Image: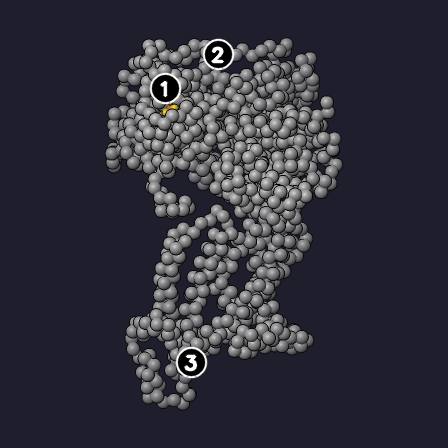
């Protein structure tokens, strides 16, 4: 059958002041009716440019320099602008990454959809409004009629993305292009949106081009996958086959850089050396050669074609991995790889002890939010310990209070109530010199290192600053210390004389890490240190954090929304929901045998780069949206989204109960596992 | 909303007190004085002193200010000896005429400036955009009185198309019944005003054109024209409404000059004559009006913004 979309040898050029970037360089892909094709690859590999080419909506300086794009028999590259406008929306729809900016802020969501439905169709206003309401229902917006007149700013990110989908599908195009449709959303909402797209694909029989940097996002839903590298397709094939046994060394490297695959064994992640090549210069040979561990002479002079191999898959490599192909060894499900956490760990005095921590933010009378006065309950009675030398991971979706906890512990905020003890010393009541000294022992590695460094200060000064503030050592000792640290994070000493903007995001994160270590703290609080990083950069930073922990005996409080990353790095994790820790325990234990329904939902929502696992999780996950922290639900805060909720959940706050060894504790009335003590053996 | 207004009114009161007090002091520091000006050149010092006492100008400044304020609270703005009428009457007679001129002038400059700015944004960085940009700089560079005199010289003296003077009369109806005479004052106003509106609109439109929501509109197949008129223009006009409110005082200042150049019988002309004649009560009255105009303008800007932009709510 002729595919609905066939891209042949597509070339896209972006003209810069003095060079031409070949953003897409000979890409050929096709998409059959009702099929989902995933395009994955790291930042800058040309995914978005490929997608925008199909819409013929390249940025002002970009142009399609060659190749063909056939959509349902039409050659798009040959259409006039007016004809192309007719194709957009009618034959192909697109949804974009950022639902927060992609809708017109001054037009109600219903009207925006109605406009989309009317374009190029002779619908009357009333008919269009009717259709828009139907579409809102189609994309799963409850009470669509009431929400018709809502403006985008009154909607959450998930709802806005639903509205985007409704607009894109308003005239039932045959092809939907989704460029990172869920990257800006929380995992539970991401899961819902991906399910919705998949569901609509089946119901409307359309084909979907799903672009993502996240292998897990495409794993469970795409029928086929194309992996892009430096403007080219490195490899493509059936999702199952490709995920089970990648053939291209780049794909293989991506998989080995995934924390989730190494979480059980906790082996170091594979890091791809170097950086992708710049696309402004002509490139000879295999583009991956400088970073490829199998590269040989031929690879640097000759370009491997994207050839169909004997097994029907395509890859552009002279030495494909596993030739002949063999399935990747997969750890058997349920294998007893749970690291043994000493049961007496609980008995030892913890390094950090957080007890009944509460942080309420008063709502300034009317600031932006009208009328509503009261308090935002950001952290509500949180208790946990962090032991010496361990990594404690705090995981939860945005707005759950993880960052606030981090800021309270480093002393950037004052708690409303509760105590924070470091080494047995109460921090919340310390003052003056004692306070300053105690502060030295806890350092924060910032979430966004690009804004947390003074852009006009050289790196040397930035790194020296904490030492100077705390009056540690003389000038020579300080210099010595920061040079040593820079070496430890793997940056050359020459970096000291450069400015923050001269570094990549990953390198800045390393610098931020080095700065956190200058005072030799006992505890390092890291807030989302690797979010927004490419997979290979993330792997490098995670490896380094683990190595330095070992070398320097560091203790980490690791905060992240990414369950896979938290699980990989942490010995124990705490799962947060709306200001509460709902479950704590050894990482693997919590991940494999979650007792709290929210933890289970989080595990199900977090995408895993394994089609088999992902398919089992389809249409599971967490329903609904995060309620406001201004008036959090009574009793169990999760009850509004919990499928097991009973009346008692609204009345009585569930107490924390033990569930297993290593201090596995969860707070739920109707847990998914039997509490310890009810029966002798923990859940298997 | 009520709270917002209450806060703004309180704010307005303080500003009015401060501005009038400062102007009061400054006026009294000027040489000459109202009494000297209202008497014939050959008046004796005794006559001057007598009149000074009569008008109460010999009392301490704060007492004078207190009296003025007290009268103001009772709705009495004072009496202008030069015009021989209460200041309030003078202002209420001339205010509608000035408003007429301002509305016509602002309307004309918006009528030219807004479409021009949108056109320029649609043709950004093309030749027509650059040409129109040149025209706007001309308008920026030319002072109001210069443009007014130039137009008089060209269209009234050399070519006699329009009368050189503005329409005369006591009422707005009379003014409006002489449209020919209105052309030059309004044209001067428009010529000096359109530039800023077209620049504002051009940059607001260009900002909006690169927003993600415009990309969304294109992705559903909207034409550039639809993108521009349905999505972008509304968002750009929001900026203009705000700016209009904030620019009211500047526009009033422009009206003063236009009225002077064309001898238009509005508040501006009265203000200018009062300044020459040391007619303090009138000067104070007009300054008070300017202050109120500034405050009203910024309140209108806020309200307009809140009405047009659903994201904005008035907060105290
Ligand atoms: N407006 C632009 N001007 C110049 N170069 C651009 C522009 N947009 C993209 N590029 C270049 O084109 C190449 C491909 O970019 P593209 O946006 O398609 O990558 P991507 O795979 O979508 O990456 P990401 O994951 O970051 O979205 C990159 O080298 C990028 O630097
Ligand atoms: S062609 Fe050579 S350099 Fe390129 S991926 Fe294959 S082995 Fe590596
Ligand atoms: S306490 Fe009730 S509502 Fe809360 S998670 Fe447990 S079952 Fe669900
Ligand atoms: Mg992209």
Q: Is mark 2 within 8 Å of ligand 3?
A: no
Residue B32 image-quadrant placement = bottom left
Q: Earlier in the sequence, mark 1 or mark 2?
A: 2
The mark total stands at 3
Chain to which mark 3 belongs: B
Q: Is residue A228 left or right of residue B53?
A: right
Q: Badge 2: how crowded within 10 Å, few (<14), some, or many (20+)?
A: few
Under 8 Å from ligand 1: the CB of mark 3? Answer: no
Which secondary structure lies at badge 2?
loop
Which quadrant holds residue A374?
top left
Q: Which residue is mark 3?
A: B85
Residue A123, image x and y in percent? 65, 43
Q: Is residue A29 visible?
A: no
Residues at circles 1 and 2 in contact by the CB criterion of under 8 Å:
no
User: Same chain for the residues at labels 3 and 2, yes or no?
Assistant: no
Residue A435 horizontal side relative to residue A533, left or right:
left
Where residue A576 appears, x then y in whole percent?
39, 27
From the image, tell me which residue sits under label 1. Answer: A585
Q: Which mark is residue B31?
A: none
A350 left or right of A485 in image: left
* Residue B86 vertical position relative to residue A124 in the rendered view, above or below: below
Residue A233, horizontal then vertical, whole percent:
64, 24
Mark-to-mark CA distance, 3 and 1: 88 Å
Q: Mark 2 sits on what residue?
A: A333
Can see residue A127? yes
Chain label for disc 2: A
Q: Residue at x 67, y 36 (%)?
A: A90
As helix, strand or loop, the secondary structure at mark 3 comes to strand
Find residue B29 and report its image quarter: bottom left
Categorize mark 1 by other alpha carbons within 10 Å: few (<14), some (14-19), many (20+). Answer: many
Residue A574, percent from left and from top: 37, 24
């Amino acid at each position: 059958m002729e595919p609905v979309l066939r891209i042949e040898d597509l070339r896209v050029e972006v003209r810069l002041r003095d060079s031409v970037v070949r953003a897409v360089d000979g890409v050929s892909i096709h998409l059959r009716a009702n099929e989902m094709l995933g395009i994955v690859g790291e930042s800058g590999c040309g995914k978005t440019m490929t997608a925008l080419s199909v819409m013929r909506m390249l940025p002002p300086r970009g142009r399609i320099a060659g190749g063909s794009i056939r959509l349902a028999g039409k050659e798009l590259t040959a259409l006039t602008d007016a004809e192309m406008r007719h194709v957009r929306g009618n034959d192909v729809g697109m949804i974009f990454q950022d639902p927060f900016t992609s809708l017109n802020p001054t037009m109600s969501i219903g009207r925006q959809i109605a406009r989309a439905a009317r374009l190029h169709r002779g619908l009357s206003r009333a008919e269009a409004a009717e259709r828009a309401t139907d579409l809102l229902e189609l994309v799963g917006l409850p009470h669509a009629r009431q929400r018709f007149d809502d403006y985008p700013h009154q909607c959450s990110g998930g709802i806005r993305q639903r509205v985007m989908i409704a607009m894109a599908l308003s005239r039932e195009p045959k092809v939907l292009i989704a460029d990172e449709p869920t990257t800006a959303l929380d995992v539970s909402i991401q899961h819902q949106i991906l399910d919705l797209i998949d569901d609509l694909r089946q119901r409307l029989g359309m084909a979907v081009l799903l672009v993502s940097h996240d292998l897990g996002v495409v794993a469970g839903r795409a029928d086929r996958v194309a992996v892009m590298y430096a403007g080219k397709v490195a490899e493509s094939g059936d999702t199952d086959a490709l995920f089970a046994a990648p053939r291209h060394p780049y794909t293989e490297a991506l998989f080995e850089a995934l924390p989730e695959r190494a979480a059980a064994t906790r082996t170091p992640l594979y890091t791809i050396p170097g950086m992708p090549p710049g696309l402004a210069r002509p490139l000879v040979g295999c583009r991956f050669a400088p970073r490829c561990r199998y590269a040989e002479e031929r690879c640097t002079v000759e370009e491997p074609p994207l050839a169909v191999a004997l097994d029907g898959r395509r890859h552009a490599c002279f030495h494909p991995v596993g030739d002949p192909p063999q399935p990747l060894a997969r750890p058997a499900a349920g294998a007893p790889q749970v690291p043994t956490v000493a049961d007496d760990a609980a008995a030892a005095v913890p390094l950090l002890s957080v007890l009944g921590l509460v942080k309420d933010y008063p709502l300034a009378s009317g600031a932006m939010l009208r009328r509503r006065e009261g308090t935002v309950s950001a952290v509500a009675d949180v208790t946990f310990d962090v032991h010496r030398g361990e990594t404690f991971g705090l995981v939860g979706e945005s707005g759950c209070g993880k960052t606030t906890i981090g800021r309270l512990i480093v002393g950037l905020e004052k708690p409303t109530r509760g105590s924070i003890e470091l080494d047995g010393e109460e921090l919340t009541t310390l003052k003056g010199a004692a306070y300053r000294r105690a502060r030295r022992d806890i350092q924060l590695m910032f979430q966004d290192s690009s804004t947390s460094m003074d852009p006009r200060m050289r790196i040397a000064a930035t790194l020296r600053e904490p030492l100077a503030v705390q009056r540690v050592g003389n000038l020579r000792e300080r210099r010595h210390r920061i040079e040593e640290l820079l070496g430890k994070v793997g940056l050359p000493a020459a970096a000291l004389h450069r400015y923050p903007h001269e570094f990549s995001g990953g390198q800045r994160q390393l610098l931020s890490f080095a700065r956190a270590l200058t005072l030799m703290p006992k505890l390092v609080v890291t807030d989302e240190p690797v979010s927004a990083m490419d997979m290979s950069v993330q792997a490098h930073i995670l490896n380094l954090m683990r190595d330095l922990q070992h070398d320097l005996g560091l203790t980490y409080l690791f905060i992240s929304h990414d369950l896979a990353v938290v699980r990989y790095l942490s010995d124990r994790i705490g799962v947060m929901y709306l200001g509460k820790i709902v479950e704590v325990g050894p990482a693997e234990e919590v991940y494999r045998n979650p007792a709290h329904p929210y933890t289970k939902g989080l595990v199900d929502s977090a995408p895993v780069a394994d089609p088999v696992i992902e398919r089992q999780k389809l249409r599971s996950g967490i329903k609904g949206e995060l309620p406001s922290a201004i008036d959090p639900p009574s009793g169990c805060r999760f009850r509004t989204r919990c499928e097991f909720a009973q009346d008692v959940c609204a009345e009585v706050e569930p107490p924390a109960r033990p569930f297993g060894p290593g201090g596995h504790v969860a707070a739920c009335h109707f847990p998914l596992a039997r509490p310890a003590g009810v029966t002798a053996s923990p859940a298997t | 909303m009520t709270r917002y207004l209450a806060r703004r009114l309180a704010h307005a009161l303080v500003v009015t007190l401060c501005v009038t007090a400062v102007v009061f002091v400054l006026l009294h520091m000027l040489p000459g004085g109202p009494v000297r000006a209202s008497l014939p050149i050959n008046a004796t010092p005794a006559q001057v002193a007598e009149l000074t006492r009569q008008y109460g100008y010999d009392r301490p400044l704060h007492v004078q200010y207190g009296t003025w304020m007290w009268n103001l609270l009772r709705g009495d703005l004072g009496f202008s000896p030069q015009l021989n009428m209460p200041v309030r009457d003078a202002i209420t007679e001339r205010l509608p005429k000035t408003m007429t001129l301002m509305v016509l002038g602002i309307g004309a400059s918006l009528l030219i400036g807004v479409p021009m700015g949108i056109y320029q944004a649609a043709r950004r960085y093309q030749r027509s955009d650059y040409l129109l940009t040149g025209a706007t700089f001309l308008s920026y560079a030319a002072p109001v009185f210069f443009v007014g005199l130039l137009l008089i010289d060209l269209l009234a003296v050399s070519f006699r198309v329009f009368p050189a003077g503005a329409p005369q009369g006591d009422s707005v109806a009379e003014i409006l019944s002489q449209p020919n005479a209105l052309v030059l004052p309004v044209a001067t106003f428009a010529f000096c005003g359109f530039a800023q509106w077209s620049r504002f609109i051009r940059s607001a439109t260009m900002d909006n054109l690169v927003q993600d929501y415009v990309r969304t509109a294109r992705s559903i197949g909207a034409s550039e024209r639809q993108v521009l008129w349905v999505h972008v223009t509304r968002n750009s006009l929001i900026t203009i409404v705000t700016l209009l409110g904030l620019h009211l005082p500047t526009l009033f200042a422009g009206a003063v000059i236009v009225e002077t150049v064309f001898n238009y019988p509005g508040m501006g002309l009265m203000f200018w004559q009062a300044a020459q004649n040391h007619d303090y009560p009138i000067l104070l009255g007009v300054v008070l009006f300017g202050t109120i105009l500034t405050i009203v303008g910024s309140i209108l800007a806020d309200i307009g913004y809140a009405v047009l932009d659903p994201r904005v709510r008035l907060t105290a």
